[in-house]
Every structure is written in C-alpha cells, then in structure tokens.
Amino acid sequence: MVERARRTVSAARELVRKHRPDYRLISYTAVLVVIGLIIIFAIGPQRANLLNETFGSSLGDSYFILRQTMSVLIAMGAFIAFAFFFKFDWILKHSGKILLAGFGASALLALFGNVFHVEAITQCALGACRWFVIPGIGTLQPSEFLKFGVLIFLAGFLAARMRSGEINSRDKTLIPVAAILAVCAFFIVILQKDLGTGVALIAIVASMMTVAGISPRIGAFAAAGLVVLGVVTIVIAPHRMERMMTFLSGDEAATAVDGGAYHITHAKIAIGSGGLFGLGIGNSVQAAGYLPEAINDSVFAILGETFGFLGLVFILGMFYLLLRRILKIMDHLPDERYKLLAAGVFGWIGSHVIINVAAMTGLMPLTGITLPLLSFGGTSMVFIAVILGLVFQASQYTAHRSDLKKGKKDEDSRSRRRVGRTRYAGRRSI
C-alpha cells in the first residue's frame, strides 16, 4: 500500500512542474497585517494606561505596538521559512512527531498550570490556563501548536486514505480521526476551557474531511453528534451557560442589573458609534477601558469604531479575497496532500473570522477567539503565517483543470511559452 501511495504521489507531481507562486496571497495578507498594526498603534497607549492604573505597572505608550511589530517580523520570518525552505514533504515525514509534541505541550500546560499552579511558567486568567510564559519574550499558546499538528498530520493521513479508497472506513479512518479530536477536546475545551478554539479545530477537520470525500450520511451523523457534545459542554460549564442565556435574552440582557451582557453591549456601542466612516485613528472611546479585551478578541468592534461601517466592509472584503484565493489554489492542486492542507487552512482562518465577527455583532454567544492577523498576540500571528506560507508553497504546484483531466504536464516559467504566472483556468482571477 505504501508503494502504491508513492506511485500516486509521483503521478500527481508529473501533472505539473514548479512554477511562479501565487503572490496575491501575500498581498491580501499584507493589507490585513498593516491594518492590524495601525489599530494596535492607535489603541496601544490607552491599553497601556489602563493596565498601569489597574495593576500598577509601568508600560510605555509604545509597548503594544513594539510587541506587535516584533510579532509581525517573527511571523514574516516564519512565512518565508515555510514557504521556501521547509519543504512540505519533509514536514509530512515528521507530522506524527509534530502532533505528539502538540499533545505533550498541552499536557505540560495542564500539569504546571492546573495541577501545580506554577505561575513562573504558566499564565492563567478567569480560571483558565492557556499560556506558557517565556521570560523576556512573552507568552505561547499551545492550542495553536496543537491545531497545526492536527492540520499537518491529517493532511498526510487522509490523503493516504483517499488513495486507498478507505476514507469512509470506520476502523481505518473515522475512529482514528475521532480519537484525535477527542484528545484535543479534552485539552482545549475541558482543561483550557476554550470552546472557541475547539470549534475552530472542528472546522479544520470538517473542511479536510469534506474535501477528502467523506460520505454525506456519515458527515451528517458526525455533525449531529458534535452538536450534542457542544450542548453538553455548555450545560456543564456555568460561564458558558451564562453566556448562552445572555445571548438568548437578546436586548433584554443589555439592561439587566447583573451586567451579564456588558461585553457584547459595549462591542455593539463601539461598532454603532463608528457610523459610516468611523471616529478616526486615535479617537476610540471604548478602548479606554469600557470594552473588555479591546486589543485582542474585541478588536473587530474597535475597528468598527475607528474606521466605520465602510472600513469593516473593506476588512471583511480582504478576508473574503484571502479565503477565496486559498480555495482557488486548493481547487487546482493535483496532489491530495496539498489539497487537504489548503482545505484545513481555509477552515482554520475562516472559522476564526466567522466566530469572532459573529460574537462581536451578537449573532452568536460571546466566545474568546482572535481575529486573524488583526488581534494583538504573537502565537496566533506566527502560526497563521506558517500555514499561509505552506499554502504559498503549494501554489507553485497548481495546474489547469484540463491538465488534471488529461494528465498533461504543466509548463513552468522556463517553458518556451513563458508561462510564468500562477496556473489557473479562466479569463479573470481574483
């Protein structure tokens, strides 16, 4: 079976030669990163002053923009490394070790944070321990590494099952994938109390399984089971149940004396007060201590207050173009492993955007999850850069649909026809 899989991969590669990568992927990403730096620059001093007054710290006005700039520089290095130097074949060869390392990091976090409460190396907030503390650098969130491990491992695992026609096999595919998800859910949802990241992980796996060709009937049963488990995790956790009741209460919760809807109320105030064109850079009111996590999970609301409705439309449009580009690349990849990788990246970024925006606009219960490339934080920024770097690497091996059907070799930038552009069908390409 291994030899047959190798022959299949070799045949897929024969369909296309290495050619010019898809630089539009970089363009859309860069625009979002620049917007993120602008908003951190605008509200960073307010956030620093708030922390100084609350905790007696002595953070300077430039603290957050310097930290975010450093994160962007590291992310740029990570993107270049995974786009040009770390070949996907080599990464797949070590995918099992990467996944085990993700499990190991999550287990260590639970041990030192939840059991021994070692504050020197772990950071806990609101009863949840989700970060390692790295002296002199900042914090590291193991759940991001675990998502990356699941993405890489399943890209190779599901591709092998596709080639052998066993994608719907209970013993060889469904049970192993379910076991991986169960272990991830234990660490992320139960121990780290991070349902938002758990939903994002499910979106990654669901996207990959869909592209792999899972049976609709099996997919429907799996979705129903996940809904039931989701309800259980909400019912058994008082803070999640409170958020759900706040969401179901709608506008009535905004006037309740217990302040259960404080966060979402101020998020809506921020977006509404931005109007059509926004209040302008540096004029945010909600960032001055009214809106919780204004620089992290709630940054979408601050973007609305600063740039207005038209600004939010532009930002969402950039995310749409980025996600559409990933799908276009995926659709023209002959190698199943690359195709599944792109599908998982689409699920990763798309789920974060949908969950964050829906939570900030009151379309779903409030949950803490970053807005990719825009929220303050290094771990999320770096891993988003890593996965986009891998998709950029994959974009060098796309082929026309006609080539995929006929088994025709694609030309590269050195061919006599000088086909130096990224190879997609159609007259217009976004």
Image: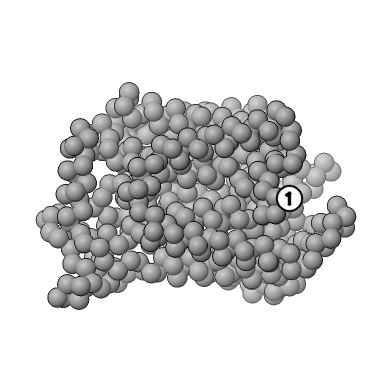
The answer to whether residue 51 is above or below residue 253 is below
Q: Quadrant of the C terminus?
A: bottom left
* Residue drawn 14% across the image and 75% down it: 416
Say what secondary structure mark 1 lies in. Answer: helix
Percent x, y of residue 152: 40, 44
Amino acid type indicated by mark 1: His
x, y percent for residue 330: 32, 54
Tell me which corner region of the image, top left, top right, bottom left or bottom right, holds residue 198.
top right
Neighbours of disc 1 within 10 Å: few (<14), some (14-19), many (20+): some
- Residue ID at (48%, 53%): 349
Judge left or right: residue 70 versus residue 81: right
Vertical comparison of 26 with 109: above or below: below
Total numbered badges shown on the rendered structure: 1
What residue sits 20% from the left and 32% below the top? 1
Considering every residue shown, the one lying at the far top of the view is 171
Residue 58 location in percent, x, y? 84, 60
How far from the left and from the top, in percent, is residue 328? 33, 59
Q: Identify which residue, 369 or 37, lies in the foreground.
A: 37
Colouring rule applied to residues: one colour
> Is 210 left, or right, of 401 in this rendering?
right
Inspect this view and state whether residue 358 appears.
no
Going by the image, does 220 lie left or right of 51?
left
Residue that carries the numbered disc 1 in the rendered image: 263
Query: Which quarter of the figure has residue 7?
Result: top left
Residue 168 is at least partly visible in this image: yes
